[in-house]
Every structure is written in structure tokens, then in C-alpha cells.
Amino acid sequence: MDLDRVLAQRLHTQGLTTASSDLLDVVRSLVCVQSQDAPLARWSLAQRTDYPGDAAITTALDSGELIRTHILRSTWHYLLPEDLGWLLDLTSPKLLRSMAARHRQLELDDPDVVRREQAGLTSLLSGRNFLTRRQIQTVLDRDDLRGERLGHLLMISELEGLVCSGPLVNGQHSYALVAEWVAPSQAKTRDEAVTELVQRFFVGHGPASIAHLARWTNLTKSEIKAAITDLGSALDSTVLGGDELWHAPTLPDPGSGKGAFLFQLFDEAYLTYPSSNFPRVPDHPSGDQALSVAEAGGGVVISDLLDVGWWKRKDLGRTTRVTLSLAPSLSPRQRSAIEAQAALLAAHTDRTLALADPS
């Protein structure tokens, strides 16, 4: 399988060229969807679900059908509540150990101190009293529990399954007690959890390598290999440039994969595959410079399976300004398709498009 075929297949697998009508099915297929830039993470979901408005996705958050929390890595993800418990059990202990040095610096390494702070947090949120981080800080009114220290206490509490996202409060992420917001689910043994995660990742993200999954989560490569062996014919593989890429046993024809996409920087279709990503065109406006992970509010422009530029978004009242920086070699057809995507991005939040193209 050549690179174009692999890229087209991933677009198909992730629902970008065969959009689903069901938001929850999309999240279930991807298992977890990286969402530290929450508004644009909702755009990523919209791209896979026939472009529903942003309000339709926030409704799922407000109802608890969709959860946003720290999981898999030290960043936020969207996931379904039914997957919260076993994924935390599987990945959180190793992740918490990896942050031990920073927690010592923040004086959050003493379990008694953490439990005492969590008792106060539990009391504060009890009774479905959904609060944003700023509201929690204001109510606590303590100089020793501000900024990064409060942020890490909340992250620890998320990774330990005490809190997760609640409904949006004035458009902002709030916290809820998991015990009050998420229905209990059946626990899994570690072997069961590893096998399920490996299968669902490759079926929902494939063709992908063992290294791609190891980056995506904190499973070891030996654990992943063992699970692949146990799964047998439930997975199949292809080879690209010497790398073995795993996927569902039956792959439908993905078509050409041609078309335009405005991927936010943390989109699963762009971020997941650093070793076999969309090639850059020679006249890319950024040259060889990579987009910074600090580039919140924008991302990469893909046209016909090639990385052809970058974009940034800024909401201005009832207008969304989308700034495009594109390779000069693009054809009028390609530019038109990209601009149509920018219009969909603005419409996603019920705004009109103001297009800027410094190139």
C-alpha cells in the first residue's frame, strides 16, 4: 500500500470522507478525541458528522452523553462516559507516576495532602454544583491553591476518577463529581482493557503503527504486540516503507481521498501519525518550519492529500475571520474547496465568514 492509499484510508476510517450521522458513534469509534482547544475539537467532531452546529455538540456535553477530561496523556480528551472508568484504570497510574517530579515541586506528592484537598473539592461540587476552575478558585479563596497548583490538583482528581467535565457554565468547562455525573460501568482486567484499546485504536485510526499507538497512549510496545497476537484475525496489516501498519481486517475502498480539510492542530487525523503524515508541498508558506503546538486557534490546510498551508480563526461578534496562508501553486479549484471549508468553519458557530489570505 502506498502513502496516498494509506492517507485516503485513514480519512475514510476516521469518518472524514464518509461522515456519520451520529456524534456519539464518532467518538466511540475514535475512543478518545484530543480536546485541549475545546471549541476547535468540537469542529473536528463536526467534520466527521455532517457538520452539525456547535450547539448540537455542546448539548451532548451538557447532558453528560459526552465527557471532557484528562485521560491517556496529560491533556484533555472527549470520550463517552461508558469508557471513562476502564480507561482511567488502564492509563492513569503510569501517567501520574510520570508527573511525580512536578507534583513534588507543587507540594502535591503527599497523599494525605491530596486527599485533604480533594475532600474540600468534593464538598464544593457535591449536589451537582457544577463550577468552573475560576469559580472553584474564587470560592476557595486561598493563595496556596491557585494557578498551576490548583490545575494539577484538578488533573490528579480527573486521573483518579473523582471529577470530570460537567455542563458548560457560561460557555466554560465546568467540573462535576464522577460519582454524580457518570453511571458506573463494568470494570475490566488489565489484559481485557489493553486488548480492547488496541483493537479499537487500530479499527478507528488505522492503518497505523505500533509506534503511533504507543505515542497516543502510554501502553508499552510489548503490551501492544501481545494484544495484536491475541486478537489474531480481528486485525490485519499492511506495510509502508518498512513500517507495519495495522487496521480492521476488511478495508473498504476509500476512494481517492482528494478534497480540502481545515484540520485543527490537534486533530486525530493529523497529530496521530508523525512518521507517515501528509507530505508538504515544496512551496509551503511555512517552509520546513513545523507548526507550533502553541498555535491554538488554527491548524493545517490539507488539499488532495498534501499539506498546503495553515489557517487561523478568530471570532468577532457575529463574524468568524479565517486567515489562510496557502502555497502559491494551488489551483483555483483547490482554493475554492479550501474557502468552502472556511465557510463551514464559520457556519459551525452560526457566524458569517470574513476571509483573509495574506498569500
Image (cartoon, rainbow, N blue to C red):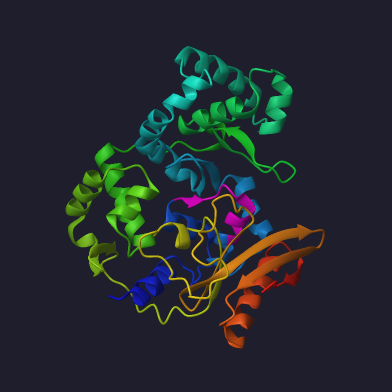
- In the image: residue 262, left or right of residue 254: right
Q: Position of residue 304 (x, y in %)?
A: 48, 79
- In the image: residue 241, left or right of residue 356: left
Q: Is 92 in front, or is 260? A: 260
Which region shows up in magenta?
A: 32-43
Q: Residue at x 37, y 31 (%)?
A: 93
Relative height, residue 114 to residue 22 (above, below): above
Name the quadrant of the N terminus: bottom left
Q: Position of residue 245 (x, y in %)?
A: 27, 63
Q: Residue at x 48, y 55 (%)?
A: 27
Relative height, residue 179 to residue 1 (above, below): above
Q: Position of residue 90 (x, y in %)?
A: 35, 37
Quadrant for residue 191, please give it.
Answer: top left
Residue 167 appears in view: yes
Q: Residue at x 65, y 76 (%)?
A: 339
Asked whether residue 351 is drawn in magenta, I would say no
Quadrant for residue 87, please give it.
Answer: top left
Name the quadrant of the C terminus: bottom right
- In the image: residue 67, left or right of residue 272: right
Relative height, residue 132 to residue 195 (above, below): above
Residue 162 appears in view: no
Asked whether residue 42 is drawn in magenta, I would say yes
**Outermost residue to the bottom:** 332
Quadrant for residue 355, please give it.
Answer: bottom right
Q: Is 147 in front, or is 293? A: 293
